[in-house]
Structure formats: C-alpha cells, structure tokens
Amino acid sequence: MNLRQQLTKALFYTSASSPDSLPEDIGNEVAFAGRSNAGKSSAINKLCSQKSLARTSKTPGRTQLINFFTLSETNKLVDLPGYGYAKASQSKQQKWIELLEYYFAHRQSLRGTVILMDIRHPFQDADLAMIDWCSHHQCELHILLNKVDKLSRNQSFKQLKLAEKQLSNFPKELVSAQLFSAANGTGMDELIKKLEMWFDK
Ligand code: GDP
C-alpha cells in the first residue's frame, strides 16, 4: 500500500503518559507537534481523510498524552500533546517537558517532526523551544504554516519568506517549511511528499 492509502487506514494504537509506557521502539514514526489551536488535529484528520481520527487525542484525559496511530506494520503517526496551553498547571507542564525530552532524546524510530503553526502568529517562544529541541537531537523538522486560507496570497508568501529567514539559523538539511491549510487542503501534496521521504529513509 502506498502512503496515501496507509493514511486513510490510520488507526488509533495506544497512548503514552510516561517514558515507560511508550510502545516498542521499532519501525518508522513521524510526529506532529504544535501549540494548542494551531490546527494539529485538523491537519491529521485532513491528512488521513478521517473526520475524527485525532479527536481521540482531544478526549479529556488524553490531551497530555503522546498518541500513536498505526499506518502499516512498520509506519506510525505520533500526535504529541499540544503545547503553550496557559491553563495547564506547572506540574503538568513539567511532566510534559520530561516526556517530550525523553521521546526526542531516545526514540530511534522517529524519522521527522511536523510542527504546526498558525501562519498569522508563527514562531512563538514555545515553537522556538520545540524547534531547538528537535534540532538539538538532530531530528528533521518540517513546519506547516497553517490556516493559509486566512491570508491573501501575497501575505502568505511574505510569511513563508519570513519563516525561511528565521529557519536560516538552523542546519538547512534539518529544517523546512511550507504553506498549509487543514481547512481546504492547500499544501497537502507537498506534505505527503515530505512524509514519503521520511518513511522511506
Ligand atoms: P489543535 O488544538 O492544534 O489540534 O487545533 P484544532 O485542529 O482543534 O483547530 C483549532 C481551530 O482552528 C478549530 O476551530 C479549527 O477549525 C481551526 N482550524 C484548523 N485548521 C484550520 C485552517 O487551515 N484554516 C482555518 N481557517 N481554520 C483552521
């Protein structure tokens, strides 16, 4: 089955709340991260052509967990907990940081991380921390400047140029960015190409 077909068949697999509850570290994984409300769930649902796949990750009690979805025997999508949520308690945030730190430092199957940002206010502190984190662990990352449908073509390309400038501080082979809309599917082909590259690595 090709990746597009695998995506439509994505199934919830398991959740992890701590390093010792992570599933076995085998095969290939691509993780999705983003500030709460950036559109991560919408993007995963659109990517998989499934209306409520990532709703699993939004059910109360699951929002602070790492949620795994199987695509094939070897491939998984990983929905990382949304960050930058002001209401989360200090102890919850600390637990989240520890889990994520462990995940990025140890996960052998991680091929790359997609980071969702709202194109109207990208590169907030928490996003920059996430980018630092990935590149520190030599993890490739691909940024989706999401909700491009909210801006004019001109404004969108301006934002993309600004993003590319921001990213020029990081190793070129590790980072990339594109325009995206989980609402209307803009940029979907480009995203799937990136995922194919990562899963084939
Ligand atoms: P998450 O918290 O990152 O999982 O974000 P959600 O997927 O729940 O999206 C947050 C809000 O942004 C919802 O109201 C979505 O309908 C909206 N949204 C997500 N993606 C887009 C997009 O590409 N365009 C527009 N206009 N709205 C979007």
Image (cartoon, helix red, strand yellow):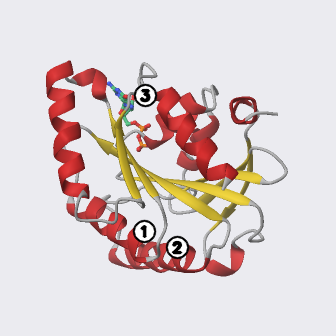
**Mark 1 residue element:** helix
Q: Is residue 113 above or below residue 17?
A: above
User: Where is mark 3, residue-wise?
Assistant: 187
Q: Quadrant for the C terminus, please.
A: bottom right
Q: Is residue 96 above or below residue 160?
A: below
Residue in the picture at 29% in, 21% down: 149
Q: Are marks 1 and 3 in contact (CB under 8 Å)?
A: no
Q: Mark 3, residues whose alpha carbon is within 10 Å: few (<14), some, or many (≥20)? A: some
**Amino acid type shown at disc 1:** Cys
Q: Is residue 45 visible?
A: yes
Residue in the picture at 63% in, 25% down: 49
Q: Which mark is residue 104?
A: 2
Across and down, in percent, residue 95 comes to 46, 78
Q: Are marks 1 and 2 in contact (CB under 8 Å)?
A: yes
**Amino acid type shown at disc 3:** Gly
Specify the quarter for ligand 1. Answer: top left
**Amino acid type shown at disc 2:** Phe
User: Where is mark 1, residue-wise?
Assistant: 134
Q: Are marks 3 and 2 in contact (CB under 8 Å)?
A: no
Across and down, in percent, residue 190 comes to 48, 32
